[in-house]
Image: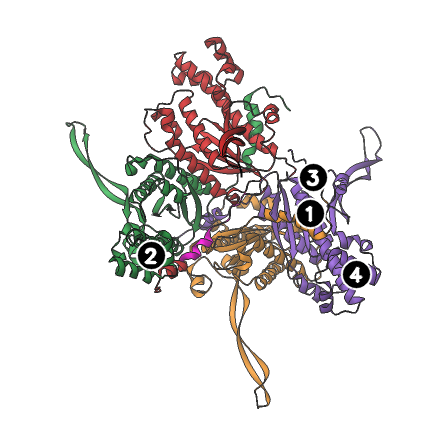
Chain colours: A green, B red, C purple, D orange
Amino acid sequence: RHFYNSPNMAKSKFEYVRSFETDDTCLRNCYIVVRLDGRNFHKFSEQHGFTKPNDNRALGLMTRSAQSVMEELEDIIIAYGQSDEFSFVFKRTSNWFKRRASKLMTHVASQFSSSYVFYWKEYFEEQPLLYPPSFDGRVVLYPTNRNLRDYLSWRQADCHINNLYNTVFWTLVQKGGLTTAQAEDRLKGTLAADKNEILFSEFDINYNNESALHRKGTILLWKKHEETVIRRMKQPNAEEKEVPVTRSKRRVENLYCDIIGEQFWEEHPDILEEDNC
Amino acid sequence: RHFYNSPNMAKSKFEYVRSFETDDTCLRNCYIVVRLDGRNFHKFSEQHGFTKPNDNRALGLMTRSAQSVMEELEDIIIAYGQSDEFSFVFKRTSNWFKRRASKLMTHVASQFSSSYVFYWKEYFEEQPLLYPPSFDGRVVLYPTNRNLRDYLSWRQADCHINNLYNTVFWTLVQKGGLTTAQAEDRLKGTLAADKNEILFSEFDINYNNESALHRKGTILLWKKHEETVIRRMKQPNAEEKEVPVTRSKRRVENLYCDIIGEQFWEEHPDILEEDNC
Amino acid sequence: RHFYNSPNMAKSKFEYVRSFETDDTCLRNCYIVVRLDGRNFHKFSEQHGFTKPNDNRALGLMTRSAQSVMEELEDIIIAYGQSDEFSFVFKRTSNWFKRRASKLMTHVASQFSSSYVFYWKEYFEEQPLLYPPSFDGRVVLYPTNRNLRDYLSWRQADCHINNLYNTVFWTLVQKGGLTTAQAEDRLKGTLAADKNEILFSEFDINYNNESALHRKGTILLWKKHEETVIRRMKQPNAEEKEVPVTRSKRRVENLYCDIIGEQFWEEHPDILEEDNC
Amino acid sequence: RHFYNSPNMAKSKFEYVRSFETDDTCLRNCYIVVRLDGRNFHKFSEQHGFTKPNDNRALGLMTRSAQSVMEELEDIIIAYGQSDEFSFVFKRTSNWFKRRASKLMTHVASQFSSSYVFYWKEYFEEQPLLYPPSFDGRVVLYPTNRNLRDYLSWRQADCHINNLYNTVFWTLVQKGGLTTAQAEDRLKGTLAADKNEILFSEFDINYNNESALHRKGTILLWKKHEETVIRRMKQPNAEEKEVPVTRSKRRVENLYCDIIGEQFWEEHPDILEEDNC
């Protein structure tokens, strides 16, 4: 309706739309957890022939992608993954993206997803990726160390329950010759002890000796280490010479252990900050 | 501190952490816009040798990825992209993901990012992708058609201003033999008319004849079309025969035109819903 | 743990706590509705002997308090009240309190509540107020005129349903000699038409002739009027003389009419702003 | 546009507007602070002739109103007031109003405001209240005991700074004969030590001996006490007799002491809950 003789004038006329953005800053001094979940991964895993009950290539690719996220977003102190989900915990005092929830979760979702496709070949080799997969995410805040630990315990307990079920289920199918419907029937109403017993007495499998990766999921942590490199240096009035230079670096480390009990947290006292801060 | 004799009991003890999730439902009857922006794409474009001022391979890949988003999230009615950004507009009555902002923006960011890597080869052929790129996103709500149109106009005005500047800048460098510092100096304080004049009088370039893709950016729309397939059918008491079946389908269409004026909206009356609803 | 030799230093050490405040700005270009509801007003009305089914002193006091709110918060364009509730609508372009939801709703709740006690005597005269009553509030946003009108229609429909029920109920008790339990029984499952019929055939009451205040609730609007005052003025080189000065003023007006149909909105075209803005 | 033959049908047509309400639940396991601030109290205090620098009637009325809030909203564990502001702290595990921020703050603002008018006479006696005053409010969340204590320390440091300034300022005016402009000039750039010195050397006033109410503000706490009442009781096969019955009750207690240091919190260990919960 108006006439503008310059594009800058035109643009400035529209710029008011920026004021419709709302502030979604995360409450300070809380742990920020971003959890990603695969979308339609049941179908995705079938189309790509994932082995049952666990496909180590797929789990490795998830972990590789999570590592890529940690390397990009420095304030992540611990990550935990199992099946087609991964949780990333930002330190409570983080000011990454000024704690804007939308930026944090979209960046995590984006970096994870592009990495998943980028590193596919390293894990699946000749088997082609049929289409670009996707993950959705959410942000949850936890005010205390107890709440955060209970969150991680919740995810690990979920891993345990599902993996025990899936292990028995697929053993009944693959070794016991049951159909999937028969296996489902057989497991209806069974407790953890019953499932352990089926594995042990019928298939001679001690569940506790199964792979820790499958039973416990994957924990990613920062590990500090010293790195020594040789540098050529020249002092004034002296010949150039080679000097060893040692620097403290950190890299992402994978663990497959219990994080529900006290031991893990006692062995890694640097992950959590004091509540009294 | 407690002893639990079953993993289900253990899990239920931790499940209270779910109640820390907060509701981020988008206000009803507003357009939901998700905008993605490339992270560190200045560096990314240099490392991958993008041509200046515009790289059609890169723009094509952005559009291909946006198309993949539209095909996955059906309630997107229009998308607009330029440079390393893309905006997606959900219809105001959409109930996708129950209008949860976090789910909407992470899904868009994830699908776009995995597609960007997945389709890279279709656009960059032998040139390898060096590392997985990432995008961050945000959600903005617009209550009225006017507000939404002004948002899209704002992005297209931005495209215009940047592209005019970049076109002159790189012409001065590539054809005029200026250094980048000299070109920057030359353009300091110039108006749009001045820039058009430099192109025209010194390089015989009429800016309005430059590629619409570069001047206007890319609009993605749904286009309905009829599709006829032959089906073999059998009526009772009759032989099986081939029957043509026509169905209305829709596919994503690319446009490179002005969306600031009235004409576009008059020609596409189905994109926006009435305000009076 | 630290020693500070000045209170200003001490204060500045604590000031970080301000950054825990979160932004609750209301989305622009939406109508902002603040609704107040009396807390425990069933008990309050019994303790203060409100007449049944409607107490005109109580309704008058609610309206007087709402008027006090409107006079303090200039951007309220319409208010609607019934029973122990009142809704206040801020114009969609309001920038009052920078559209901060918490400020808007607490100011409304506070002004209303202090006014309720302050003006009590004007309506209840010798009957004492036994204790300070309270109201709780909420904020709701409406993007379009249709949504806002439907909100107001919802409240007026609620008024109608409750008042029809209460009118028949208390007529059965007060004139029909039924106990409250018998009246409740009698009305179970009756439709609006049945209730009208009871009033008409048994008590010779035409519900449509009942007080509009009770049937329709109270609408508060701004009404412009001219006000002429006499000012003594002195021109240079002339004697001082009295001059009439006319100014446009506005005051709050009460209406008790239907706001569900079109007529009210056609007669008051200034209340709503165009959606297309 | 439609015809409805019953008001219930009409109402149900409009009820969709309820879905525009958004959830504003406060993050769990955080302290919820509601702070009220008087609106235009500078003007209000002048119009009602408040004594300078402190008016004990006004402070008493603020405290009486805050007490009324605490008695209504049981989960408030501590309140702190000074000048025309009052802060209320809900226990971190509170589930009052399901932790809905809007309900919490409007209820506090409403109860406080109606109480302020209701109890006015108890403090100002014959001096009339000229108009209903108002307060605005906000909600802030604090995740840890340290953050909450720092919030309260911040408000008490603010009280200290303002009261020291006001005490010297009004002493210079009231006893020193300066105009308010002269007093302002005199205090420009002075430190706390300077202000103490002026009071002491020129007016023989030791600031530390001034009223603790003015220097420290008002803390409201719950205090448990035993209450014994005589009840007439009748055992089977026995005569009715009077029996003393002792019950634990709690009432609001006022304190005017330092809450910045450790001592207060050591003496009142029940106010805060453990962070490790």
Quarter the N terminus of chain C occupies: bottom left
Marks 1 and 4, how far apart at CA: 29 Å
Q: Secondary structure at mark 2?
A: loop
Marks 2 and 1, how far apart at CA: 53 Å
Badge 2: chain ID:
A
In this rendered view, identify the residue nearer to me: C254 or B204. Answer: B204
Q: Which amino acid lies under the numbered mark 3 shown in the image of this protein?
A: Leu
Marks 2 and 4, how far apart at CA: 68 Å
Mark 2 on the same chain as mark 1: no
For marks 3 and 2, give the one nearer the viewer: 2
Span highlighted in magenta in the image: B14-27
Asked if the stretch drawn in magenta spans residue C25, the answer is no
The label on residue A260 is 2
Quarter the C terminus of chain C occupies: top right
Residue D83 appears in the picture as rendered = no
Q: Position of residue B136 (x, y in %)?
A: 43, 36
The residue wearing badge 3 is C272
Q: Position of residue A80 (x, y in %)?
A: 34, 48
Q: Are marks 2 and 4 in contact (CB under 8 Å)?
A: no
Q: Residues within 10 Å of mark 3 (few under 14, many from 20)?
A: some
For marks 1 and 4, give the one nearer the viewer: 4
Mark 4 on the same chain as mark 3: yes
The label on residue A203 is none
Q: Are marks 2 and 1 in contact (CB under 8 Å)?
A: no
Badge 1: chain ID:
C
Q: Residue at x 41, y 11 (%)?
A: B176
The residue wearing badge 1 is C152
The residue wearing badge 4 is C198
